[in-house]
Image (spheres, rainbow, N blue to C red):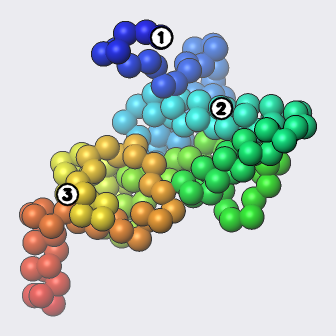
Amino acid sequence: MGHPRKARKKYDTPPHPWNAERIKEENRLVAKYGLKNKKEVWKAETMVRRYRRDARYLLGMASEHTGKEREQLLGHLVRTGILNEGAKLEDVLDLTVEDVLRRRLQTLVHKRGLARTVKEARQMVIHGHIALDGRKIDAPGYIVKRGEEDKIGFYPSSPMKKQIEAAQDAE
């Protein structure tokens, strides 16, 4: 079970540390999504790996119990926005790391236009300027669910919100 106060590692490290293609791809993802370090890429890779492993297991098994598990896996992926409505279990095998990275709060803050760059979006999230449905979220790696996507905004007492409103009033 492990120690209750010591969290388990949520990622797997690469099997070989000096693979040039992997390093280039990780650097590209870190730059594109404004990540802090490669550990965040590894977390996303581990999530995708686990989803794909579960899908392979469910595709190989045929029983009434796996039908319920299929629905649960697909429901989870659709709710989180990683897959679209009406997706099949075979679509889980086509998931990529970028599918998971696109659902991060940091990325969606940038996509919605609340920040000019992904790095600025990360800083705004960490400093507590961003809220989801009025709740302050200060984790840039928070996976935003499909229903929460339109509730992203500034925290009500954020000085950033006041500055932006003042700038809009001046125009």
Q: From the viewer's perspective, is the residue at label 1 or at label 3 nearer?
A: 1
Label 1 secondary element = loop
**Mark 2 / mark 1, whichever is N-terminal:** 1
Tell me, yes or no, if residue 18 can be seen here: no
User: Disc 3 versus disc 2: distance between alpha carbons?
Assistant: 32 Å
Question: Which label belongs to residue 50?
Answer: 2
Position of 2 relative to 73 (above/below): above
Question: Which label belongs to residue 1?
Answer: 1
Question: Where residue 62 sits in the image (x, y, percent)?
Answer: 90, 37
In the picture as drawn, the residue positioned furthest to the top comes out as 2
Question: Where residue 65 sits in the image (x, y, percent)?
Answer: 79, 38
Tags 1 and 3 in contact by the CB under 8 Å rule? no
Position of 20 relative to 115 (above/below): above
Residue 63 located left or right of residue 160? right
User: Disc 1 versus disc 3: distance between alpha carbons?
Assistant: 37 Å
In the picture as drawn, the residue positioned furthest to the front comes out as 64
Along the line of sight, which residue is nearer the eye, 26 or 50?
Answer: 50
Among the 4 quarters of the image, the one containing residue 141: top left
Tell me, yes or no, if residue 105 can be seen here: yes
**Mark 3 / mark 2, whichever is N-terminal:** 2
Q: Amino acid at mark 3?
A: His
Among the 4 quarters of the image, the one containing residue 85: bottom right
* Image quarter hosting the C terminus: bottom left
Residue linked to disc 3:
129
Q: Residue at x 56, y 47 (%)?
A: 100
Q: Residue at x 88, y 37 (%)?
A: 63
Residue 10 located left or right of residue 122? right
Residue 85 located left or right of residue 116? right
Question: Where residue 64 sits in the image (x, y, percent)?
Answer: 84, 41
